[in-house]
Amino acid sequence: MSKWAGTLSTTEPYNHLSVMQVRQGNENSEIFDFKVVRNSVPYDLTCARVLFCTKFKPHILVEKEATVLKPKEGLFQFVMDDDCMQRVGDQEGYFEIYEDGVLLDTTQNFVYTIQSSILKMEMNGESYIQRLEDLLNQLNDSFANGNAEFEKELEYWRQYVADNKELLESIDPGGALLNRINELQKQQEELNGTLQTNAALQIGGETPRPVFSSALNLLRQKIDRTKFNVLHMTDIHTDYGHGRTSWKYADMFWSHITNMQSLQDLADVAIYNGDNADCYIKDKDISEQQQRKFGIKAIRSAAIPTFVNLGNHDNGSPPFKRDIGKVMPGDIITNEEFKDFYETKTKLFDEVRNGDSLYFYKDFEDKKIRVIGLNTNDNNQSVFNSDGTYKYGSHDHFAMQQEQLKWLANEALKVPNDYHVIVFGHCPLHETIFDNRECAIKILEAFKLGTTVPIKSVYPDHEVDFTASFINQGPGNLVGYICGHWHDEGFNQIGESIKFTQMRCLNGGFSDPALIDTPQEDCWSVLSVDTAAKKVDVFGFGRATNRSFTY
């Protein structure tokens, strides 16, 4: 029997609910029966999944599944648990409606009041409360899943221990809980963020939507597993959708990642080449949620080596440049913060980085291929205007700094003579607002020729001055430079002393409603490198076309 009931709307600016008070620890009694309507008409929930969503500071997201009771009448039931009651006081939540892994709609927010329980404990004066056993479980989960809040949780725990020694001795006389928590502290200093979610919930769906099945099967038949195959997606601009940005259907883009991942068994590596999230709302919290969600979907669920490059939308700077013409510190995700989202500190796939840099290389010895990923948004974030704003806010400015360029010349491009090198970066190398693009081009030319070249520029705040030499290793095999950003397809021959191929790739996101539920809704490619013939065949999926080039 339900304890609470009411009507939720996806279209009206209000809900019809009574005051709802829940108590922490009531695991199976906080039962809600809701009716969801759209334009005052019951929402048809046939074949739909309904998920409750809420958020607790600091950036802890909760998604829990409800049970649809009468789909034609829009009736469903939700049982609230402790994950939904982490903080005493008023809490906002809402429900998302999915079908085949695609977000269809959301209800308006509603408020429920969380009351404390005597069986719970208060942590760090913040009204965050939970059972002692639950704390241990949470710390274990944090360690296993890579939780950036691990250190903060430990700090809460240390303070609680200091303030409640007598209580702890009475409930944990052997010190088992304390010992285990201390072990976790020794094992891990800093772990990545976590998304609290049902194990069954898969972002973008666990399998491709039926509309894509035939096209994916056709693409499968074209791929030669003996070649070096790259799954490549760029400019997908994932978002929460709901018409909140120019990408009105962005909530559907997650299923496109599922499509590409369905071919992992035929590929050697996957590259997401920037503008992975749109981040076009002036809210850093939302931008961080988007990037965390993208990292979970693209990287943590990967079955093959998978790497993510930065694009100019990813840090959340576009709306600030659009609305106020400047970006303040604290408004955007910094390059340091991206290292958690994109797993550069953990090096999940045994790649080589410059410390924990946002650029990398990965060798595939069996096929004698080296893949290099560059950070074309390597702007100097320590330089500010007189009003305290960032001088280089990333949305409208690209750069590569000396440290990355020297690493490219002195480490990433130092390969055995029989290796072939393919380079990925978000921004085209002939983009005019790209500081030190000329330096990158000269380095790649010198690698291909096996020569020595001075690398120097005088861009303010991005100065470069060193020498790149490849004389000892001789001429190199440069497959090409693969990029996105311009949302188009094409080839460029780049270089002065010798040419190499730059391939531009179409954006993964779409905005035309006529494409919905067609294969053209999606857009990405498989690059198949034949090192013997020095040829790359590009097999496009959805709006991407088939093409090829030699090197």
Image (spheres, rainbow, N blue to C red):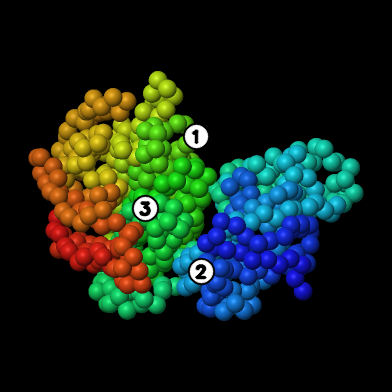
Which residue matches tag 1? 330
Which residue matches tag 3? 246
Most extreme residue toward the front is 40
Q: Position of residue 416 (x, y in %)?
A: 25, 50
Within 10 Å of the Cα at label 1, are there few (<14), some (14-19), or many (20+) other Cα atoms? Answer: few
Instruction: Identify whether 514 is placed above or below 85.
Output: below
Which residue matches tag 2? 98
Instruction: Identify whether 199 is placed above or below 383.
Output: below
Quarter location, residue 497: top left
| Nearer to the camera, 502 or 479 | 502
Question: Can see residue 376?
Answer: yes
Q: SS at mark 3?
A: loop
Question: Can see residue 483?
Answer: no
Tag 3: amino acid: Ser
Q: Position of residue 66 (x, y in %)?
A: 63, 69
Q: Is residue 452 left or right of residue 274?
A: left
Disc nearer the start of the sequence (3/2): 2
Q: What residue sits 21% from the left and 31% below the top? A: 455
Which quadrant holds the C terminus? bottom left
Q: SS at mark 2?
A: strand
Tag 2: amino acid: Tyr
Instruction: Identify whether 308 is placed above or below 447.
Output: below
Marker disc for residue 124? none
Disc nearer the start of the sequence (1/3): 3
Tag 1: amino acid: Gly
Q: SS at mark 1?
A: loop
